[in-house]
Amino acid sequence: MNNQEQLYSLHERVWHWLQAAAIIVLLLTGFQLHYPDKFPVAGDMARAVHFHSLIGIALLANAFLGLFYHMTAEKYHHFIPKMDDFTTGAIRQFRYYFHGIFKGEPHPFEADHRHKLNPLQKLTYLMLLNVLFPYQIATGLLLWGANRWPHVFAKVGGLAVIGPAHALGAYLFLAFLIVHLYLTTTGKRPLSLVKAMIAGNE
């Protein structure tokens, strides 16, 4: 593959880093709401709640802009798994991550501008974008609207249910972030995948 082949457009890179920054800030401010003495990142609690809500809205807006871009630019196919991705493709990728990479074996998937995600990435983003992200939006909106829609909030269990449910989603996002950061080091060189998302070229 040409060393200067563009993998990620400017829009994709900006969108990616904005989403990453928003998720990290949401995690930090969310930790402050749960552990105010250990994570005083946004001042007092009222300011942390307000900042957390604003960043959540910004994340949602950026997500919809990303969806609009991928649909109108016909780039959504990168995220749609094929049948092979659920079976042999996923098995090959699992084997590489847990065995082949430590033996110096070549990566089973070669990314290019037509195929940017390996089978496990497709399956992960399928769950992330269609299950975890909507789940976190729903629980976040319920928390945000607790004083605005008290009857609705009470019917779904109130803070005793929605609070832990939203925290669970946050920890799942944190687990994704940790794994994602680790996998960025599995390219041809430890920082090659990060550089590709910055410069756009593989």
Image (tube, rainbow, N blue to C red):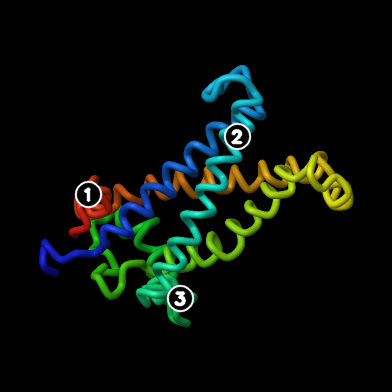
User: Is residue 21 rendered to the left or right of residue 110?
Assistant: right
Q: In this figure, which residue is indicated by the disc labeled 2?
A: 30
User: Is residue 193 rendered to the left or right of residue 166?
Assistant: left
What residue is drawn where x is 37% and y is 53%? 16
Q: Which quarter of the picture shows residue 105?
A: bottom left
Q: Which of marks 3 and 2 is nearer the N terminus?
A: 2
Q: In this figure, which residue is indicated by the disc labeled 3?
A: 81
Pick the residue in front: 133 or 124. Answer: 133
Pick the residue in front: 134 or 150. Answer: 150
Q: Position of residue 189 (x, y in %)?
A: 20, 49
Q: Residue furthest front?
A: 148
Q: Earlier in the sequence, mark 3 or mark 1?
A: 3
Would you say the residues marked 3 and 1 are in contact, meaning their CB atoms lie under 8 Å apart? Answer: no
- Assess disc 3: are there few (<14), some (14-19) or many (≥20) residues with their C-alpha within 10 Å of its C-alpha: many
Give the residue type at disc 3.
Pro
Q: Earlier in the sequence, mark 1 or mark 2?
A: 2
Pick the residue in front: 87 or 144. Answer: 144
What is the C-alpha distance between the residues marked 3 and 1? 26 Å
Q: In this figure, which residue is indicated by the disc labeled 1?
A: 195
Q: Position of residue 68 (x, y in %)?
A: 45, 68
User: Is residue 84 rendered to the left or right of residue 34?
Assistant: left
Q: Is residue 152 above or below residue 122?
A: above
What residue is drawn where x is 72% and y is 46%? 165
> Which quarter of the figure is the N terminus placed in?
bottom left
- Assess disc 2: are there few (<14), some (14-19) or many (≥20) residues with their C-alpha within 10 Å of its C-alpha: many
Q: Residue furthest top?
A: 37
What residue is drawn where x is 51% and y is 49%? 59
Q: Position of residue 53 (x, y in %)?
A: 60, 40
Give the residue type at disc 1.
Lys
